[in-house]
Image (cartoon, rainbow, N blue to C red):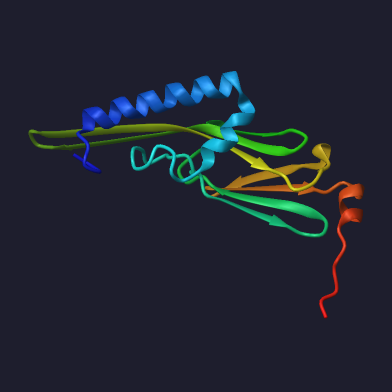
C-alpha cells in the first residue's frame, strides 16, 4: 500500500487517468490547460498533472522556458509551438530489477505527461530554439517586434 491505496487500485486509477487524459486531448486539446492544476488526480501517480516542473521567464526580448525532465531522452518527449502556447508532452518509463540469490524484484512504472504553457505575447516561431542537456530542457522564444514595442515601463513615484 502506498498513499493509503492498495497497489491494484492505484494501477487501475492510473490507467483510468491516462485514458481520460488521452480522450480529452483528442476531443478538446485546449481544455488540457485546465489539467495542469495540482489538485487534479492527487497523490495517485509519480507523474501527476504538474510534472514536469516548469519555469517561465519573460524578458524584454524573449521568453525563456526551462523544464526538468530527468532520466529522459530527446525521443521521449515532443515540444510544439503554436500561436499562443508551448506544448510539451511525452512519456517516461522506469524499470528496476534486482536479483539476489532466490530473491527477485522487478518494478516498472510509466507515466505520460502533457503541459500547455500559455505565452504572454506573440513570438517568432521560426526562430524558436530548444536544447536538452542533463535532464533539463531549455526553450528560447524570441518576441516579435510588435510584442517588444508594446512593452512599456511605468515610472513609480
Lateral position of residue 40 relative to residue 145, left or right: left
Q: Work out which quarter of the rendered image holds the C terminus and state it.
A: bottom right
> Who's the residue at 46% across and 46% down the image?
38
Q: Position of residue 89 (x, y in %)?
A: 56, 33
Quarter where residue 119 is shown? top right
Residue 117 x %, y %: 64, 42
Left/right of residue 135 with respect to residue 145 in the rendered view: left
Quick one: which residue is furthest to the front in this view? 157
Look at the picture and state if 25 lies above or below 69.
above
Query: Image height check: is 110 above or below 46?
Result: above
Q: Report x, y in % for residue 130.
A: 69, 43
Percent across and percent down for residue 140 are 73, 48
Q: Which residue is drawn at 43% across and 44% down?
A: 39
Q: Which residue is painted at 21% across and 42% down in the image?
A: 4
Q: Quadrant of the N terminus?
A: top left
Q: In which quarter of the image is residue 58?
A: bottom right
In the image, residue 145 above or below residue 88 = below
Amino acid at each position: 500500500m502506498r498513499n493509503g491505496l492498495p497497489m491494484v487500485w492505484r494501477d487501475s486509477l492510473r490507467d483510468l487517468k491516462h485514458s481520460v487524459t488521452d480522450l480529452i486531448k483528442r476531443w478538446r486539446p485546449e481544455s488540457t490547460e485546465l489539467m495542469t492544476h495540482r489538485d487534479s488526480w492527487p497523490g495517485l501517480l509519480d507523474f501527476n498533472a504538474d510534472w514536469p516542473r516548469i519555469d517561465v521567464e519573460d524578458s524584454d526580448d524573449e521568453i525563456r522556458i526551462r523544464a526538468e525532465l530527468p532520466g529522459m531522452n530527446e525521443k521521449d518527449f515532443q515540444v510544439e509551438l503554436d500561436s499562443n502556447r508551448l506544448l510539451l508532452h511525452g512519456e517516461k518509463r522506469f524499470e528496476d530489477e534486482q536479483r539476489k540469490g532466490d530473491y527477485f524484484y522487478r518494478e516498472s512504472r510509466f507515466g505520460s505527461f502533457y503541459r500547455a504553457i500559455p505565452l504572454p505575447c506573440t513570438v517568432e516561431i521560426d526562430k524558436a530554439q530548444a536544447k536538452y542537456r542533463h535532464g533539463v530542457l531549455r526553450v528560447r522564444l524570441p518576441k516579435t517586434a510588435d510584442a517588444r514595442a508594446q512593452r512599456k515601463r511605468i515610472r513609480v513615484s
